[in-house]
Image (spheres, rainbow, N blue to C red):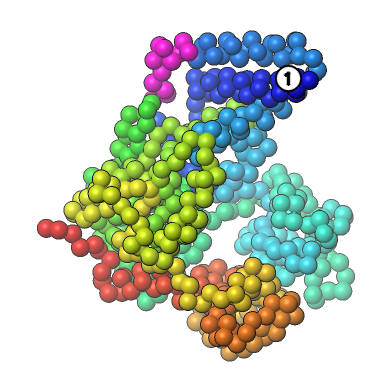
């Protein structure tokens, strides 16, 4: 009986191996996953030798034979499709940490953020007290056209109750998104009406912006990029042009937390800063000969100072961007060591709508550094825990905790020393700021009371908060509202309390977060980042470099 129990799993694993082998010889298309940059090879030749083809053919024949045995001879009727779906992820798990199998039902959702749009009703929402609250209505979107406004509560969808314990983010997204041109009926509770309001909304294309903040501080233009999506280059170049027209004489590019995206988009963006002939990146793999990418000299901002911010979650395309700036001595990198994701994935689409994203090469910075940090095949959990290990090792607080061998030393075009070993090492290290961390602060963050208080304040002052025309004007108003004492009382009502010492140490940071979230929930995304950055030590260090005219690295003659 035990043998019969294990037979389906073993057979499905073998079958999956055969299917993967078939993929390697078969369909060949290109795309990317969020957080993964892709590379389209010049040739479709995978570099198989005759021996490889013979081995693959023998394996395929064996898999087909096993498939026939399972179908015709196994004691029970098997759902072979489900066996394969269960088995393929097991196979992929034994490869590198970035090869990935995506079931058909998940592929479209995975693509949406990088593709730059999806079809839906066009709102930003938050769930408060088991109710969907409209935080912001996307300008020009279906909801704005129908009359939905910030502060509305969605309580019914297509005449069915849509609130209560079962409401969560996934359910809301799946319900409100849908095919372009399809209709959905929303029942709305609004503070100015005693009656339930009904709106028929026709779903449409909703833009997904990856350049999430653009503002000017003095003569420094700040640009925050969340990922490298299909539309990011145009968003980026428009931001730079706008900032330049308003007087920007230097740019601060914030890639912190940016997990990556499309390689070609990243190349277009960094090309704006580099002179003709500068190497941007190269890729190389067992079946992929070295492929170099050079700047074409048509960049519009080749002489403007630039500083790039990175951290532990800056990965893939973010590392290509910062590595190219650093190795060409084009600007200064500030922050902490980046994630270390330098594996190139290529997508193989399957005929059932699913896809396999398989690692085919590695990325290298212009100096020759491999971006990818070390990993063990099949050890994905250990790999993802690397950032936690860095934290425990003290790397977030002390640059000296990073021990780099001389064998990992490379040189920039100007002769500066840079190091491999996984990720991009910043030129200027800024440790994590822990000066405001107390048990009370942690309880406030973990319980969500800061966000809840900011939402309630925004919700009850929407008319007044909609009147501001500048960040400074709104900041001045909020600072005069005595927010911190009111928040402390609100938090205490939620059983989140702290002593006077903790309040003194954490109070200013908590107040800053409250104001930032009020700004965001009132529709001022740029203000949110201005407020958030106002006491951020990494941002302030980078800003000073630009203000002091020291963004260009000092190189040897």
Give yes or no for residue 45 being in the magenta stretch.
Answer: yes
Does residue 230 appear anywhere in the picture? no
375 left or right of 477 in image: left
User: What element does badge 1 sit on?
Assistant: helix
Q: Residue at x 67, y 14 (%)?
A: 67
Task: Pinpoint residue 177: horizontal percent, then vertical percent.
Answer: 70, 49
**Left or right of 521 on screen, residue 186:** right
Instruction: Residue at 25%, 45% (x, y): give it.
Output: 407
Q: Which residues are magenta?
A: 42-55
Front position in the image: 459 or 149: 459
Q: Position of residue 390 (x, y in %)?
A: 45, 56
Please tell me which residue lies in front, 338 or 182.
Answer: 338
- The outermost residue toward the front is 2
Mark 1 surroundings within 10 Å by alpha-carbon count, few (fewer than 14), some (14 through 19), many (20 or more): few
Q: Quadrant of the N terminus?
A: top right
Q: Dot 1 corresponds to which residue?
A: 3
């Amino acid at each position: 009986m035990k043998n019969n129990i294990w037979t389906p799993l073993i057979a499905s694993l073998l079958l999956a191996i055969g299917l993967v082998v078939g993929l390697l010889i078969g369909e060949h298309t290109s795309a990317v996953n969020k957080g993964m940059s892709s590379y389209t090879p010049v040739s479709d030749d995978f570099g198989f030798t005759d021996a490889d083809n013979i081995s693959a053919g023998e394996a395929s024949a064996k898999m087909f034979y096993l498939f026939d045995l399972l179908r015709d001879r196994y004691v029970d009727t098997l759902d072979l499709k489900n066996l394969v779906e269960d088995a393929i992820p097991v196979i992929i798990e034994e490869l590198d940490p970035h090869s990935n199998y995506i079931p058909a039902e998940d592929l479209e959702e995975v693509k949406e953020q990088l593709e730059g749009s999806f079809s839906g009703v066009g709102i930003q929402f938050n769930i408060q007290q088991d109710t969907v609250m409209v935080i912001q209505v996307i300008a020009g979107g279906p909801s704005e056209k129908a009359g939905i406004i910030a502060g509305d509560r969605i309580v019914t969808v297509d005449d069915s109750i849509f609130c209560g314990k079962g409401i969560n983010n996934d359910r809301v997204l799946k319900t409100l998104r849908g095919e372009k041109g399809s209709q959905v009926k929303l029942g709305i509770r609004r503070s100015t009406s005693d009656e339930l309001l009904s709106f028929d909304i026709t779903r449409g294309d909703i833009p997904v912006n990856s350049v999430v903040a653009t503002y000017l501080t003095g003569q420094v233009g700040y640009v925050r990029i969340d990922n490298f999506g299909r539309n990011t280059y145009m968003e980026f170049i428009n931001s730079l042009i706008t900032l330049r027209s308003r007087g920007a004489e230097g740019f601060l590019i914030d890639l912190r937390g940016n997990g990556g995206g499309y390689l070609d988009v990243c190349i277009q963006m960094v090309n704006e800063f580099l002179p003709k002939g500068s190497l941007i990146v190269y890729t190389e793999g067992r079946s992929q000969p070295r492929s170099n990418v050079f700047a074409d000299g048509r960049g519009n901002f080749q002489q403007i100072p630039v500083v790039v911010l990175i951290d532990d979650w800056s990965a893939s395309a973010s590392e290509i961007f910062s590595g190219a700036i650093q190795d060409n001595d084009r600007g200064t990198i500030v922050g902490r060591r980046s994630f270390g994701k330098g594996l190139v994935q290529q997508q193989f689409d399957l005929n059932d709508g699913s896809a396999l994203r398989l690692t085919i090469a590695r990325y290298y910075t212009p100096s020759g550094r491999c971006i990818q940090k070390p990993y063990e095949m099949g050890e994905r959990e250990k790999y993802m825990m690397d950032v936690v290990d860095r934290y425990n090792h003290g790397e977030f607080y002390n640059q000296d905790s990073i021990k780099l061998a001389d064998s990992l030393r490379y040189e920039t075009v100007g002769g500066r020393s840079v190091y491999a070993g996984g990720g991009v090492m910043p030129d200027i290290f800024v440790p994590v700021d822990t000066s405001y961390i107390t048990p009370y602060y942690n309880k406030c963050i973990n319980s969500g009371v800061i966000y809840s208080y900011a939402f309630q304040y925004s919700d009850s002052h929407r008319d007044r908060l909609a009147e501001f025309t500048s960040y400074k004007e709104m900041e001045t108003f909020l600072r005069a509202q005595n927010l911190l004492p009111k928040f402390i009382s609100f938090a205490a009502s939620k059983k989140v309390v702290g002593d006077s010492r903790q309040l003194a140490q954490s109070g200013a940071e908590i107040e800053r977060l409250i104001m930032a979230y009020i700004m965001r929930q009132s529709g001022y995304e740029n203000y949110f980042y201005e407020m958030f950055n106002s006491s951020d030590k990494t941002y302030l260090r980078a800003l000073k470099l630009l203000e002091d005219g020291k963004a260009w690295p000092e190189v040897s003659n």
